[in-house]
Image (cartoon, rainbow, N blue to C red):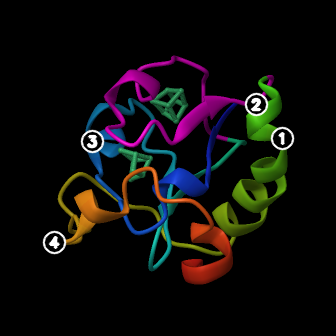
């Protein structure tokens, strides 16, 4: 399955949602996660993310975020291409370190 990492936090560009054929993204206040039970490993979302926030779970950089995706996918609502808004300051948070500690919600 694919995993959204902390790089998404406060960026939430939403380009991923546009291409996912199975609508498996779930939306929290500051980031999205992928429902591991729904993702079909198509790889369409990964190249679309301007923040490079999406990784396949087999990559070591994805490991710390696997459980977070699983946990919140069961709690947060689905997001469709028509729902959700990119934050106006999304660009300012691209590549910023420590976003999980400061801004996760
Ligand atoms: Fe959706 Fe494909 Fe990305 Fe999985 S890999 S979240 S199915 S676009
Ligand atoms: Fe987040 Fe990238 Fe999607 S920043 S909302 S994973 S396009």
- In depth, the one of 102 and 62 nearer the eye is 102
- With respect to residue 35, does 54 lie above or below? above
Q: Which mark is residue 57?
A: 2
At x 36% / y 36%, what residue is drawn? 49
- In depth, the one of 67 and 60 nearer the eye is 60
Q: Marks 3 and 1, how far apart in space?
A: 23 Å
Tell me the residue that label 1 is attached to.
63
Q: Which mark is residue 88?
A: 4
> What is the x, y in percent for residue 51?
39, 43
Bin the neighbour count of mark 1 within 10 Å (Cα to Cα): few under 14, some 14-19, many 20 and up. Answer: some
**Mark toward the start of the polypeptide (4 vs 3):** 3
Q: Marks 1 and 4, how far apart in space?
A: 29 Å
Q: Secondary structure at mark 3?
A: helix
Q: Is mark 3 within 8 Å of ligand 2?
A: yes
Quadrant (top left, top right, bottom left, bottom right) of the N terminus: top right
Of badges 4 and 3, the one in the foreground is 4
Tell me the residue that label 3 is attached to.
15
- Is residue 105 visible to the viewer in this orientation of the structure? no
At x 36% / y 59%, what residue is drawn? 12
Bin the neighbour count of mark 4 within 10 Å (Cα to Cα): few under 14, some 14-19, many 20 and up. Answer: few
Quadrant (top left, top right, bottom left, bottom right) of the C terminus: bottom right
Q: Which residues are magenta?
A: 38-58
**Mark toward the start of the polypeptide (4 vs 2):** 2
């Amino acid at each position: 399955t694919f995993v959204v990492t902390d790089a998404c936090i406060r960026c939430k560009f939403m380009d991923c949602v546009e291409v996912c054929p199975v609508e498996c993204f779930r939306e929290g206040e500051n980031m999205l996660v992928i429902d591991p039970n729904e993702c079909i490993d198509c790889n369409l979302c990964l190249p679309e993310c301007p923040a490079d926030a999406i990784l396949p779970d087999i990559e070591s950089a994805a490991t710390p975020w696997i459980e977070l995706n699983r946990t919140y996918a069961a709690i947060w609502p689905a997001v469709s291409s028509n729902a959700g808004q990119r934050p106006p300051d999304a660009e300012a948070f691209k590549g910023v370190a420590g976003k999980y500690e400061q801004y996760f919600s």
